[in-house]
Structure formats: structure tokens, C-alpha cells
Amino acid sequence: MAKADKKKKIAFIRTSSINDLARYACRFDQTPTELIRTVYKGESRIIAPGETVDGHVLFYYTPSASKESIVKYIAGFDERVEFTDEIDLSQTDTYYMSIVDAELSGLISENPEKISNVAFVKIGKADQLVRTVIKKAIENENIEKAYSFSYKGKAVLGAFDLFDELDDEQKIFYYTFMDSLPKEGFIRYDYSNNKMDFSNEIGEHSYMYAKKIELAEPFPFFNLE
């Protein structure tokens, strides 16, 4: 008899802002995207499901008391998020994500810090990590993401599973330390000059881009001790 699959659990990961959450979920095309709204311990949260780590689905979220059914994400230098019940496809650099209300209490993990089947690999420099993230984006024909957060007073930039040859059931988180956490929402890489920097906008054809998603706190399983 086949062994029953273990039920997946949810581990909440709070983003630094609603902008980070919308940037995370946005595909920057007209492909429909859905977010989840649920109430946890009396707090209403907007959620974007992410990676599966050690049997837990990471649910990136931000608190929100909104009742509207759509998230309107305005990209660009004046990046912002609005909640609405209407869609206007005539607006440029504007993307819409519908909200699905769901009761998830039976799946929520009360101890996400117990996630243990994760390996950590330190990358020497930020530009080396970014180059690898960009390479993965090109291979997958999408905009990949890197996460930034503060860990014991140090600024961290990291991403999951950058080398296909090392992928298996154990998730690998590649990380590097930086002097500070940039506030811009995108990482851009100039191949011709082999340089990276941060930007609030995407679209210049001389650059390749990755999303930078800032977390309100480190991943609960990020422990280098």
C-alpha cells in the first residue's frame, strides 16, 4: 500500500510592506494572478504563496484590513498599491491581482522555526549572487526574486535553489552579506560592464532585472549558528 503523503503546513513570512508583497506576486504581464486573504489570530492578512520548504509552504503576507476584491499594483518610480473592486486596463505600468478569501486554520504551522531541512550556502559577493539569480531568470523566462532582511545586525541578500545541479528534496538558500539593505525594489545587472545596482524601476533594455523582496524579519529557519 502506498504511503500517504504528509499534509503540507503553512509558515507565514511577513514582508516589509504591501509593495514588497505585490512586487513578489506580480508577473509584469497580463497573466491573471491571485492572492489569498485569511484571518489569523484576529488579524486579516493578504498572502502570496511561495516556496515549499521542509513540507511547509511559505506564505508571504502583510496585514491588511481592506475588504475590496482586487489589489492594484502601480509599478515604477512611484510604486504603490491600492485596493479596488474595478479594473482599468487602459492604465500603463498597472497590474491587477484578484483576492480569494480562504479559511486556512487547519493548515497553519504554529512552529515554523522548526523547519530544519534547509541548507545554507554563502556566496562571496552580492554581484555574484545577483548574476546567478539573473541567469536563472533567463533560463526560466521570468523575473526571479531575491530576499533581503536584517540578521543579527547584518544585511542579508539571498535566494533559493540557484543551481539546478544541486536541487533535491532539501531546499538550499544561497546568501551573502551587504553593507546595508537597499530600499529600492529591484536589482538590475549590466552584463556589458559586469555591474549591479538597485533601482525602483524596470524596463531599460541595457539591464537584466530581479525583484528584491524585503522581509520584515529573517526567515524563521535562517540560523547560521
Image (spheres, helix red, strand yellow):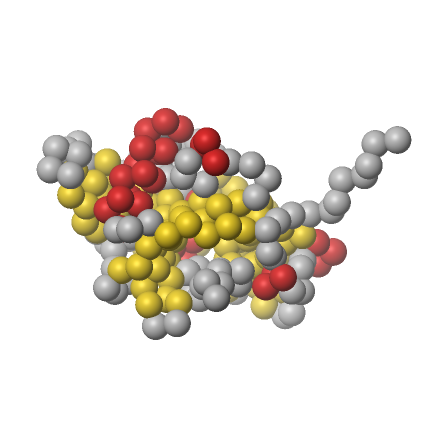
Depth check: give the residue in front, 72 or 180: 180
Numbered-mark total? 0
Image location (x, y in percent) of residue 139: 36, 27
Depth check: give the residue in front, 158 or 32: 158
Q: Quadrant of the N terminus?
A: top right
142 vs 8: above or below = above
Image location (x, y in percent) of residue 164: 45, 32
Image location (x, y in percent) of residue 44: 57, 63
Q: Is residue 130 left or right of residue 87?
A: left
Residue, far bottom:
153
Residue 97 visible in image: yes
Q: Quadrant of residue 132?
A: top left
Residue, far right:
1
Q: Is residue 92 left or right of residue 196?
A: right
Residue 17 visible in image: no
62 vs 172: above or below = below
Q: Residue at x 73, y 46 (%)?
A: 7
Depth check: give the residue in front, 196 or 104: 196
Q: Residue at x 46, y 63 (%)?
A: 224
Q: Residue at x 25, y 64 (%)?
A: 180
